[in-house]
Amino acid sequence: MNIRNILVMTDFSEIARGVYASAVDIASRLDAMIHLVHFSSVVPAFMPQFDREQYLESIEEALSSEASTHPSLTNANITPHLQRKHWTRSRQRALEEKLEIDLIIISPTGRDGIPLALLGSFADRVIQHSSVPVLLLRPGRDATTFNPQTVLVPHDFYDPPTTVLPAMEMLAAHFDSSFRFVYVYQSQTYNDDPVRVWIDNISHSGGAGTQTVEDRFAMLVRGPLAGLDATLEKCQGIPALQAVQRAKDLPADLVLIGKLDGLCGVARHVVREANCSVLTVPIPDGET
């Protein structure tokens, strides 16, 4: 996972500014450039053209000042970018491509401090539609820096963790992270698909000559996870709920999880409910 360009979203609120110090620290560790981006609000159609231009120019000046004078952004390689139209999925994707963005960093609330838990919040939409990894930063035990010592990795072990492996290697190299894989097997109470329950139970118990989850994890440790500090735990219940609970119990500094385009299932619940930072990595087409 080679990160050279980091996009940091801001709406000039103190909540958005809360990620600046961590973003600068991350960029410094990775030798990356920060692109500070603000999407303009919808400009009323009745506003005269001259007033619109003045309005946008004032925002552009404010963004430039933010990048150069905010205490958390001093001595950092930062380029401001005002998007003169309101946010849309296509505009975000186009910006990611234009700036060759490798990572987006965002606070856990949307525009005007709207909680992420509210459906349709700005942060939720950014994560949902991003084509690159997104780091949702939540204040932790050390609120001034991003220090993911313990990383929780929910995984079903049906396939190797190829989507999140590059992120794991990056975190281990630059932050000395350790990784706790969590496998959640479901009972009939939580899953009305008897075939899936049967497969889960066989994998859990090692019956019928099937490789257990422990066997699969051991193969990963000898293979793609070689050299990483990775351990495994298993629990029973609903995967989305258990992932959030285990992140709280450890406690984890970060949850690392793959997400489908559109953000659904376990990833959606973790993004909205985990009490720590979450790094989502898009799952490429064909790997689902």
Image: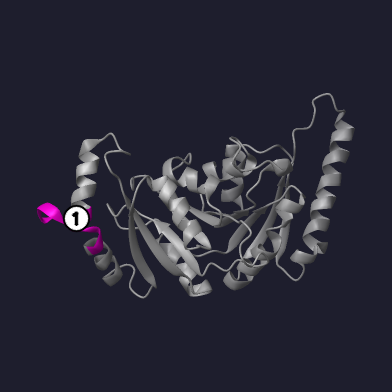
Give the image's coloring scheme: one colour
| Magenta region | 204-214
Residue furthest toward the top?
46
| Residue 45 image offset from top left, x and y in percent | 79, 25
Residue 205 on the magenta segment? yes
Residue shown at the point (76%, 49%) measured from the top left: 13
Please identify the dominant SS of the magenta region: helix
- Examine the rendered structure and indicate whether residue 49 appears above or below residue 13: above
| Residue 149 image offset from top left, x and y in percent | 51, 70
From the viewer's perspective, tell me whether residue 199 is left or right of residue 150: left
Find residue 235 and report its image quarter.
bottom left
| Residue 59 image offset from top left, x and y in percent | 82, 46
- The residue pinned by badge 1 equals 205
Can residue 220 be seen here? The reply is yes
Q: What's under tag 1, amino acid-wise? A: Ser
Q: Nearer the viewer, residue 246 or 19?
A: 246
